[in-house]
Image: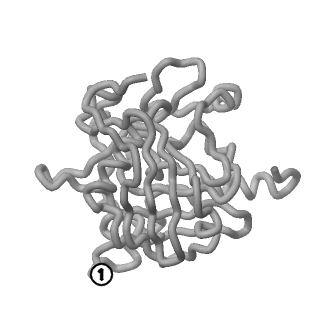
């Protein structure tokens, strides 16, 4: 952990850099206009029962991530669903922050897979449901160790509560990027390059890198996620998953 004069700089970099929407975004990129339905069996997004192992084949090599259905069933289920749909295939890692301190590798913007999309728009897209033509958003999902179920849509600002979370920002943690609204995550995700406790309680961690962290360290801005595929697990349910 950094201390002294670097600490405020680090915190400012973390909070500013993780915003899903870049500085150049205009009002054309909408956020949810109504509160997102929360919880398994309530939202139309499927939830993950158990765990899943997903392979991310990148231009630098393969990364395998383990998704946690017990602690983040809705967030992990959303990710598995998008993997199965091929949403991540060909997308760009549009934000890689290593200076002044290691931060995150971020990607998963569906529109970055389209070669016609200007690079200036990378990081502004969400997953759009083919049937309705509407963007899919999921609520912020956090589970404290003592709670039987996650809580939704509420940022935890207390350091004491954040320390009690089942999934925290360790090196290699995988979490959802979002805009300023807690319930605005969609498809974009990031991988933590080091422990980021400042983000605990603010962003939804739903998995971790199980293999290939050296590949993550090698990824540079503009590299591609060529293919994402499910290797094992990945049982999706519409209601509440089995404990």
Q: Which residue is mark 1?
A: 115
Q: Residue furthest front?
A: 232
Choose between 179 and 176: the one closer to the eye: 176
Q: Is residue 144 left or right of residue 41?
A: right
Above/below status of 190 relative to 122: above
Q: Is residue 127 left or right of residue 139?
A: left
Q: Residue furthest right?
A: 4
Q: Position of residue 96 (x, y in %)?
A: 57, 69
The residue sitting at 23% across, 55% down in the picture is 128
Quadrant including the C terminus: top left
Above/below status of 114 relative to 175: below
Choose between 235 and 196: the one closer to the eye: 235
Q: Quadrant of residue 102?
A: bottom right
The residue sitting at 33% across, 35% down in the picture is 47
The residue sitting at 27% across, 81% down in the picture is 116
Q: Position of residue 63 (x, y in %)?
A: 52, 63
The residue sitting at 47% across, 49% down in the picture is 176
Circle 1: is it few (<14), some (14-19), or many (20+) Cα within 10 Å? few
Q: Position of residue 86 (x, y in %)?
A: 28, 62
Choose between 65 and 160: the one closer to the eye: 65
Q: Quadrant of residue 130?
A: bottom left
What colouring style does the render use?
one colour
Above/below status of 199 relative to 210: above
Q: Position of residue 241 (x, y in %)?
A: 35, 27
Q: Residue furthest left?
A: 131
């Amino acid at each position: 952990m950094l201390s002294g004069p670097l600490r405020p700089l680090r915190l400012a970099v973390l909070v500013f850099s993780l915003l899903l929407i870049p500085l150049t975004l205009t009002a054309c990129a909408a956020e949810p206009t109504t509160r997102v339905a929360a919880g398994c069996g309530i939202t139309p997004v499927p939830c993950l029962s158990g765990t899943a192992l997903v392979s991310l084949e990148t231009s630098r090599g393969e990364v395998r991530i383990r998704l946690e259905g017990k602690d983040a069933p809705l967030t992990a289920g959303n990710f598995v669903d998008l993997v199965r749909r091929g949403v991540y295939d060909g997308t760009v890692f549009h934000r890689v922050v290593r200076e002044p301190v290691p931060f995150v590798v971020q990607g998963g913007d569906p529109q970055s897979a389209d070669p016609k999309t200007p690079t200036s728009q990378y990081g502004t897209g969400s997953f759009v449901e083919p049937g309705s033509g509407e963007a899919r958003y999921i609520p912020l999902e956090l589970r404290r160790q003592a709670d039987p179920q996650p809580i939704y849509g509420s940022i935890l600002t207390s350091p004491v509560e954040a320390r009690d979370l089942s999934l925290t920002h360790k090196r290699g943690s995988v979490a959802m990027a979002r805009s300023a609204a807690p319930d605005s995550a969609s498809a974009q995700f990031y991988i933590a390059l080091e422990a980021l406790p400042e983000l605990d309680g603010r962003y939804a961690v739903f998995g971790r890198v199980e293999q290939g962290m050296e590949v993550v360290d090698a990824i540079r801005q503009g590299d591609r996620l060529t293919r994402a595929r499910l290797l094992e697990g990945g049982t999706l349910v519409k209601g509440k998953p089995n404990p």
